[in-house]
Image: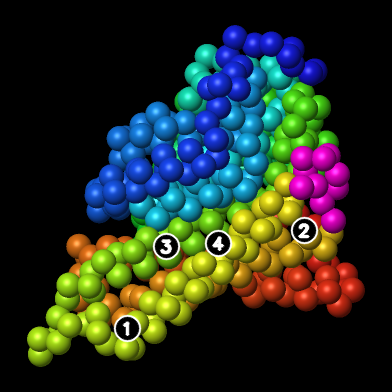
Amino acid sequence: MRLNSVSTVTATSAAVPSPEELVARARDLRPGLRSRTARCEDQRRIPQESLDEMIQAGLFNVLKPKHYGGYEMGWDSFCDITLEIAAGCGSTGWVYGVCGSHPLMVTNFGSDIQDEVWSTNPDAIVSSAKMISGAFKKVDGGYLGNGILAISSGSLHADWVFAHFTTIEGSKKQLSTIIPLDDVTILDTWQVMGLAGTGSHNLEMKDVFVPNSHAFVSNQTPPGFGVHDAGIYNVDYRILGTYPTATVVVGMAMGALDIFVADIKDRSSRFGAKIAKFQSLQLRIAESSAEIDSAKLVIRHNTREAMSFINKHEPVPMELRTRLYRDASYVSLLALKAIERIFYAGGAGELFLNRELQRIFKNSHAGGAQFGLNWDVQGTNYGRWALGLEGAQKTAPL
């Protein structure tokens, strides 16, 4: 069902900031986010003030439909903003990149479900998770879910969880559902080395009833397609689904370089020499900055190229799709190389737990370890497509 063109929560054109303004707002948040990184890691969750600042800056509205007070922008603008948040705090950037992109999952559902999510709480946050055990059983009026939904980043702050590609008992088909967080139990499972602050815990379902309206069979046309006119709400989310997390890894590299440059300007060696005058460190800065700039350019080029098709409601070509998956993993690889070079150039002093570079080193490698950003997987996939071999995936591995 298509929504009415007028809504009491629809954002007016005057209320919608420009993408440049939103990037500037995100950049202004970086010092505060960085000041809370240790607390974020220790408490294994995003500090509430960090979340509140992002909400107040309107950053969770970027991909939300205008009908619900959002800005209805594209992946290119969203990634530019995510870079800035991740440069301040990797874990906060990860939660923003994941949950901030989930309006594109909510709009997979019908208008009544979108109303339920946003009309009463315009600031509702939606996390996501994949089922690793259990199944949904078909019952009258919907499905009954039992099992574990894994690695739900931002779940400690979420109002809903999008459970995608879940098992249907007695069927080879899979189910996509949206479930109130109050209906599941958050398990304290996120005991990790890196990205601890994302609070990516597992969720347990015990006889959770999901109405038919809150579910659809995965890999079929979602019921929400056609509700909104904008192309971004009528295309497979997975085409650019790995870009939020890839962008976070690049944003962390930006933060690492900023910290390293600021630190060595005033540092002296144990023999009293100014470290900034060391040619080797100057070269490390040049190499890492070139990799980071290259990664940012690839992200911007690819997201804008994809949006040029999406905005016109045209299919994204298969060549571009496979290149998008390849490049999401490659920009992560570039960022990790930049971070490793900076970290090692910093010396043994960066090993201390109160040092920010060691935190970025851990967080970035935790991010880069994700399957969708694995270079061996995505590089091989592109090679298979380029050689005309069967088996090249058409959608991102979320």
Mark 1 secondary-structure assignment: helix
Mark 3 to mark 2 CA distance (whole Å): 26 Å
Which label belongs to residue 254?
3
The residue under the point 56% across, 66% down is 295
- Colour scheme used in the picture? rainbow
Q: Amino acid at mark 2?
A: Arg
Reading the image, the residue beneath label 2 is 321
Q: Amino acid at mark 3?
A: Met
Tell me, yes or no, whether the two marked residues, 1 and 2, touch with CB atoms within 8 Å. no
Q: Nearer the viewer, residue 187 or 84?
A: 84
The residue under the point 47% across, 44% down is 23
Looking at marks 4 and 2 on the same chain, the residue that comes earlier in the sequence is marked by: 4
Looking at marks 3 and 2 on the same chain, the residue that comes earlier in the sequence is marked by: 3
Q: Amino acid at mark 4?
A: Lys
Q: Is residue 63 left or right of residue 158?
A: right
Q: Is residue 139 above or below residue 290?
A: above
Tell me which segment is drawn in magenta.
308-317
Mark 4 to mark 1 CA distance (whole Å): 22 Å
